[in-house]
Each structure stands twice: as C-alpha cells, then as structure tokens.
Amino acid sequence: MPYVNTKDILEKASEGFYAVPALNINNLEFLQAIIEAGLEESAPVIIETSEGAIKYAGNGNIMRGAKLFVDMVREYADTIDIPVALHLDHGKHFEYIIAAIKAGYSSVMIDASEHNFEENLSITKKVVEIAHSVNVSVEAELGRLVGIEDNVVVAAHEAALVDPDEAVEFVEKTGVDFLAPAIGTSHGAFKFKGEARLDFDRLKKVKERTGIPLVLHGASSVPQDIVELAEKFGADFKGAKGVPSEILKETVKYGINKVNTDTDLRMAFIAGLREFLAGNPTEFDPRKYFKVPKEYVKGLIKERMRLLGCSNKA
Ligand SMILES: O=C(CO)COP(=O)(O)O
Ligand SMILES: O=C[C@H](O)COP(=O)(O)O
Ligand SMILES: [Zn+2]
Ligand SMILES: [Zn+2]
C-alpha cells in the first residue's frame, strides 16, 4: 500500500468524513518528519511541493527537481505500510505540471484561479485530460484566497469567494477530482486582522452539490505557543494569526478532506532551530541541529492528524 494516487486517499476521507493534512516540503528533513508522523499515527500521508520547491530542489532545473522529489518520496513510501501520495501544489505553469506528471507525481493542482471563470474552466479541463490519461488526479481552485476581515467592505471580499453554482458547473465540465473552494482563508502567517471567520455556508453548499473531496488552502493554525517560542529566541512574528483548531475541525464537518499546511511546519521548524542554536552555540553539525526542529514539526503534524480525524486511517 505504499505510493498511491492522491484520489484514493481523498475519496476514502470524503466517505469517512475526515481530512488528511497535505504537507509542503522543500527538503529531506521535512519529509522525514512527515513520514515519521504518519507511521506513528498510522495515518495516510499527502506530501506536496510548490513550483518554487521544485525549482529549489532542482537548483533551477525543473525536471530534475520534480524527479528528485519523486525519488525521495517513493524511496520512503515503498518501504513502509501507510499510503503516501505526492502532489504538485498550485501548479500555474504547464512546464511544472508536465514535469510533475512525467516525473511520477500522484496528483497535480492546476491553479488558474486568477483567471475568469470561463478561462479557469478551460485551462483546468485541458490539464484534467492530460493528467487523467496517465492516471494522475487533479485539484483545481475556484474563487480567490482572501481573508474575510472585520471592518473591511464585506461585499468586496465575498466577491472573491467561491460561487456554489459555478462550482457545480465547473466540476461537471472539467471532471476535476478535488476542488479548493475559496471560503475566506489566505496563505501565510498573517491570515486575519480581527476574529477568524470562514464562510461555512458556501462550503456546505459546494460539498452538498458537488459531492467530491474538498481542499482547504491557507489552513495553518499558527499555534501561539510556537510563535511565542520562536519569538523568545529572537524571531519577530508580530500579529501572526492562523485558522484556530476548532474552526479547522468545523471545516472537516462541512466537507473539507485535504488541509493544506505549510506555514505551521515552517514555524515549528524555525522555533525548534532557534531554540536549539541558542542553547548550543558551539554546534555546527546539521544532523544534530536539525534534530529538535524535526521533532517539533513531527509533533505538530501528529497533533493535526488527530484533530482532522485521519489517525489510524492508513
Ligand atoms: O495552502 C497552502 C499550500 O497550498 C498552505 O497554507 P498555509 O500558508 O496556511 O500553511
Ligand atoms: O501555497 C503556498 C505554499 O505555502 C508554498 O509556498 P512557496 O511558493 O513559498 O513554496
Ligand atoms: Zn490560488
Ligand atoms: Zn495553497
């Protein structure tokens, strides 16, 4: 049951009313932390890389970067007993999407959400045709990722969120496997100025009417204890705020099955690294100074897996 199509993991999650975190990596250490978390929780694992991650890993060579990630993930996946998938996050350029498909990714995201509805639909449809012909599943995005902020013109923000009628037409016409509906989250560590608020109503409608696995982007919770730890050792993350755990859990109840998480891993890692280095000024062996940050990343992932209900679902 090692390296699988992302669709297999997500369709089970949708039927079972739980979600799986999709975890961004750029290097080996985060992958190791994720795999260990998955094994300890007996949870399915979704690893994802952005276009930037592929470029970084390949040192500028896209095909090389994509192949390195597939090799690295498969080498781990093939020797363990939990399902592992590798996904291209926010594919915006055909060059990256084709490289990921050729290299052997389990799934790709085509993010044409900055285009108008018709263009998004036709670009997504094209990617679905190509990807499905080689058994690679596809995620697309509808609406744009903006936080719903207090005191800001609500109408302007709502206009950026997913339209459930459009979602139905989009899923039918493109044949996409999973959909990321914009419901008020945004990427990064500074998601909300006031209280965190998401549009559950739109989410419920999209789920009821499409029935497919749904994806929450910008889903990091930015735990305050991690922010405080990092700041204690020199970081400045003033105003950092994520999606609170209770709200994440609620999105799962309303139909989210894939919870995209990058910022939280970065935050846990930097907090652990700063803490370790502050206490060990003479250390310069990366295998030693990556140990604590890796443990923090693993701990955060295990907790998230339990929250989302995918522990023991491998
Ligand atoms: O959506 C994401 C990756 O696609 C990551 O979101 P965060 O920045 O909230 O971790
Ligand atoms: O969706 C965004 C992810 O957090 C990836 O970000 P990145 O482009 O910095 O790798
Ligand atoms: Zn997008
Ligand atoms: Zn995203």
Image (spheres, rainbow, N blue to C red):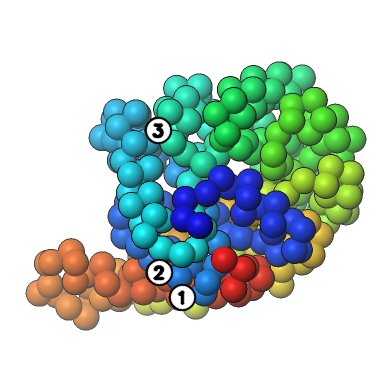
Residue 258: percent from left, percent from top: 64, 54
> Pointer 3 and pointer 1: residues touching (CB < 8 Å)?
no
Residue tagged 2? 36
Q: Could you say which is closer to the camera, residue 113 or residue 241?
A: 113
Residue tagged 3? 103
Q: Which mark is residue 40?
A: 1
Mark 3 vs mark 1, CA separation in Å: 29 Å
Q: Could you say which is closer to the camera, residue 251 or residue 158?
A: 251
Mark 1 residue type: Glu
Q: Earlier in the sequence, mark 3 or mark 1?
A: 1
Residue at the spot 47% in from the left edge and 50% down from the top edge: 3
Please rate how many residues cluster around mark 2, counting C-alpha atoms within 10 Å: few if below 14, some from 14 to 19, many from 20: some
Q: Secondary structure at mark 1?
A: helix
Which image quadrant is residue 64 in? Answer: top left
Mark 2 residue type: Glu
> Pointer 2 and pointer 1: residues touching (CB < 8 Å)?
yes
Q: Is residue 25 in view from this perspective?
A: yes
Q: Residue furthest front?
A: 1
Which image quadrant is residue 35 in? Answer: bottom left
Q: Could you say which is closer to the camera, residue 241 or residue 221?
A: 221
